Amino acid sequence: MNEVALTTPPNGGWTGAAFFDLDKTLLAQSSSLAFARPFYRGGLMGRRSAARSAYAQLIFSLGGANERATEGLRRELSRLVTGWPVETVQRIVAEAIDTVVDPLVHAEAADVIDEHRAAGRAIVVISASGSDVVEPIAMRLGADFVVASQLTTRDGRYTGSISFYAYGSAKADAMRDLAATQNWNLNECHAYSDSSTDVPMLEAVGHPHAVNPDSLLRTLAEQRHWPIHKWHRTVSLRERFGKVDARTATRVAIGVVAIGVAVRVVRSRARRRVTG
């Protein structure tokens, strides 16, 4: 890590950042649902669990990402992964990412990522999905930083508890902390999401964007004159971004470390609010 820091400016030389929600923004569907079949084939899920997971994700998709639906999905996924071996999950995700995620990336998102990178902005993927799923996808997209939910483990297995849930205002808090460490002016940064639950994330930046928004977010975006984008084409990850090179992997690794610091700050803030 220190060797990389010697050749990389402390703030990466970025002029700011573009923050992207993952599910139904960068991807055409939920990343967790996309991996349900490989997890089933890998022996992590039985038929009943696979059906319950698919049903929960379907309700989440059809009903919009409201707080009740998201919380229900969080409980379902927590229950589902309890006892899963971490190494097995990471192996399945690594082996299946090309076939599972490859057809799901919005082509318009890939274009926008290219535009922001050309403008000197860091690319930040921010998602309520678990880090073991989000980080490999973000790496393939060439992201510089990752904010994702952190699932607790014990003896190499998931306990079912979530130490940090990257949802709602927690996303915005992590964005502010990351911006502070990188000396970014959030008024000059961009954020993209499809969900009304991400309004705090969108309000945290000077340039919010609604992508394929749910009805509540569309109404708010229209009222506040936020740009509304319709992304519908998909593109091959391998075609647009190729294989992950060592430089990209290192960038994301550095980003995960930075987010770990941000997550600790967010949790500290939450504890102060509870005890204060």
Image (spheres, grey):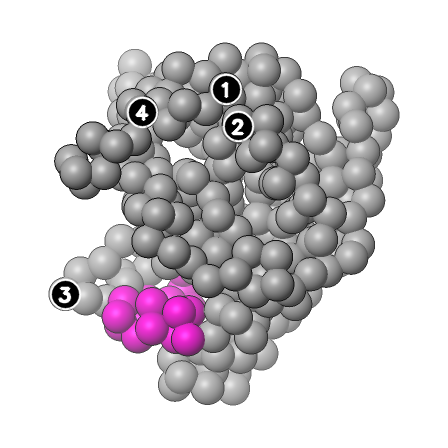
Q: Is residue 23 visible?
A: yes
Residue 132, image x, y percentages: 37, 58
Q: Secondary structure at mark 2?
A: strand
Predominant secondary structure, magenta span: helix
What is the CA distance from the residue labelled 3 to the residue labelled 1? 41 Å
- Determine the CA span between mark 1 and mark 2: 5 Å
Location of residue 111 with respect to 244 vertically, above or below: above
Q: Which mark is residue 9?
A: 4
Task: First in sequence, mark 1 or 4: give its number.
Answer: 4
Residue shown at 46%/24% (left/top)? 14
The amino acid marked with disc number 1 is: Thr
Residue at the location (19% across, 66% down)?
156
Q: Specify the amino acid type for callout 3.
A: Asp
Q: Position of residue 66 (x, y in %)?
A: 66, 43
Q: Which part of the image, by quadrant, shows the C terminus?
A: top left
- Write down the region rendered in magenta: 74-95
Residue 15 is tagged as 1
10 within the magenta span: no
Q: In the drawing, does residue 73 fall left or right of residue 85?
A: right
Q: Quadrant of the N terminus?
A: top left
Depicted 177 relative to depicted 156: above or below = above
Residue beneath disc 2: 121
Per the image, the residue denoted by label 3 is: 155
| Mark with earlier residue (1, 2) | 1
